[in-house]
Image: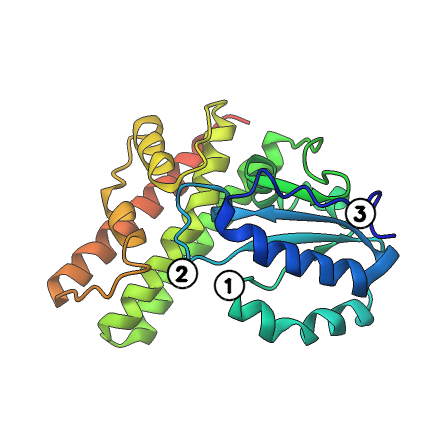
C-alpha cells in the first residue's frame, strides 16, 4: 500500500485537473508501491493564475528513498504526462526536505503557502524557517538574476523573441522571491501573481507594472517593438536591482 492510506483527496482541486491528476496518481500508486509516501499538487493549478490547456500541473512526490528505479518509472510516464500538461514532478524524501530548509527556504515557503496534498501526510505544513537563511537566499537569487539578465541580453543579440522569453522567465522567478520577501516583513502573501506584485509595490516601493505586463505575455503572441523590448528590459532590470538592494538592507 502506498503512503499511509490509498484514498485520493481530490475534492479540493479545481474540476479541470481532477481527472488527469487522478490518472497520474493511480499509476504512481501502482508503480511505486511502498516507496511512494505522498503526492502534493503545487503551483498555479491551485490559484486564479491557472489557464486550462496552457498552464502546467506541478507536483511534489515524497519517496521513502531516491533510486534509479523510481526515475525510470517516471521517465516511462513522461510522454503521457506531457499530453495532459503534467509537469515532471519534483522528487524528495522526508530527510531531503528537512535538511533543505536552510538552502531552499524560498521554494519550500512557496510550497507551504500553495499546495494540496492528495495522498499521504502533508510534507510542508509543519515546516519552519529562519529569517537569516531566507533573507540570504533572496539576496543571492536576486543578484544571480541580475547576472542572468545581463548575460541573456547579450546572448540574445538583439533578437526580440529571445529577450522577451528571458524577461518572462525572470518575472516568473521573481514571484516566489517576492512572496519570501513579504514573509520576511511579516506581511500577508497572496497566492495569485498580480496580487503579489501589487502587494510588493506597496510594501517595497518598487514599480511592478512592468512585471505584470511581462507575465501576461506568457500565453499570448505579443509583438513588441525594439523600443518596447528595451523599455521593458530596463524597467524589469531596474526593479530587480532595487529589490536586491532592499533585501540586502532587511533586518533579519
Q: Secondary structure at mark 3?
A: loop
Residue 127 visible here:
yes
Q: Is residue 218 left or right of residue 186?
A: left
Task: Determine whether 134 is above or below 42 in the image.
Answer: above
Residue at horizontal 78 percent and vertical 67 percent from the top: 70
For the residues bearing labels 2 and 3, Cβ distance under 8 angstroms: no
Q: Earlier in the sequence, mark 1 or mark 2?
A: 2
Q: Which label was assigned to residue 49?
A: none
Residue 250, given in percent of the width and then of the height, sits at 46, 29
Task: Determine whether 216 is above or below 75 in the image.
Answer: above
Residue at horizontal 41 percent and vertical 52 percent from the top: 172
Q: Which residue is mark 3?
A: 6
For the residues bearing labels 1 and 2, Cβ distance under 8 angstroms: yes
Q: Which label was assigned to residue 54?
A: 2
Crowd tier of the residue under label 1, counting other residues whose Cα lies within 10 Å: few below 14, some 14–19, many 20 or above = some
Q: Earlier in the sequence, mark 3 or mark 1?
A: 3
Q: Earlier in the sequence, mark 2 or mark 3?
A: 3
Q: Which label was assigned to residue 85?
A: 1
Q: Nearer the viewer, residue 60 or 214?
A: 60
Residue 170, given in percent of the width and then of the height, sits at 38, 56
Amino acid at each position: 500500500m502506498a503512503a499511509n492510506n490509498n484514498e485520493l483527496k481530490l475534492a479540493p482541486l479545481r474540476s479541470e485537473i481532477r481527472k488527469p491528476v487522478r490518472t497520474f496518481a493511480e499509476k504512481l500508486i501502482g508503480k511505486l508501491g511502498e516507496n511512494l509516501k505522498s503526492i502534493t499538487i503545487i503551483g498555479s493549478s491551485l490559484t486564479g493564475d491557472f489557464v486550462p490547456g496552457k498552464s502546467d500541473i506541478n507536483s511534489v512526490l515524497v519517496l521513502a528513498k531516491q533510486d534509479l528505479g523510481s526515475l525510470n518509472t517516471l521517465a516511462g510516464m513522461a510522454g503521457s504526462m506531457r499530453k495532459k500538461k503534467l509537469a515532471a514532478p519534483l522528487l524528495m524524501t522526508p530527510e531531503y526536505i528537512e535538511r533543505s530548509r536552510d538552502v531552499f527556504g524560498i521554494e519550500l515557503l512557496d510550497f507551504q503557502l500553495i499546495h494540496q496534498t492528495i495522498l499521504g501526510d502533508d510534507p510542508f505544513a509543519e515546516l519552519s524557517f529562519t529569517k537569516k537563511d531566507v533573507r540570504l537566499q533572496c539576496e543571492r537569487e536576486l543578484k544571480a538574476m541580475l547576472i542572468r539578465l545581463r548575460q541573456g541580453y547579450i546572448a540574445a543579440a538583439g533578437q526580440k523573441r529571445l529577450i522577451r522569453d528571458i524577461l518572462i522567465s525572470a518575472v516568473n522567478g521573481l514571484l516566489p522571491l517576492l512572496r519570501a520577501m513579504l514573509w520576511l516583513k511579516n506581511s500577508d502573501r497572496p497566492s495569485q501573481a498580480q496580487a503579489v506584485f501589487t502587494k510588493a509595490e506597496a510594501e517595497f516601493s518598487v514599480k511592478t507594472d512592468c512585471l505584470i505586463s511581462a507575465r501576461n505575455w506568457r500565453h499570448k503572441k505579443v509583438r513588441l517593438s525594439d523600443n518596447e523590448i528595451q523599455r521593458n528590459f530596463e524597467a524589469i532590470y531596474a526593479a530587480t536591482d532595487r529589490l536586491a538592494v532592499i533585501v540586502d538592507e532587511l533586518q533579519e
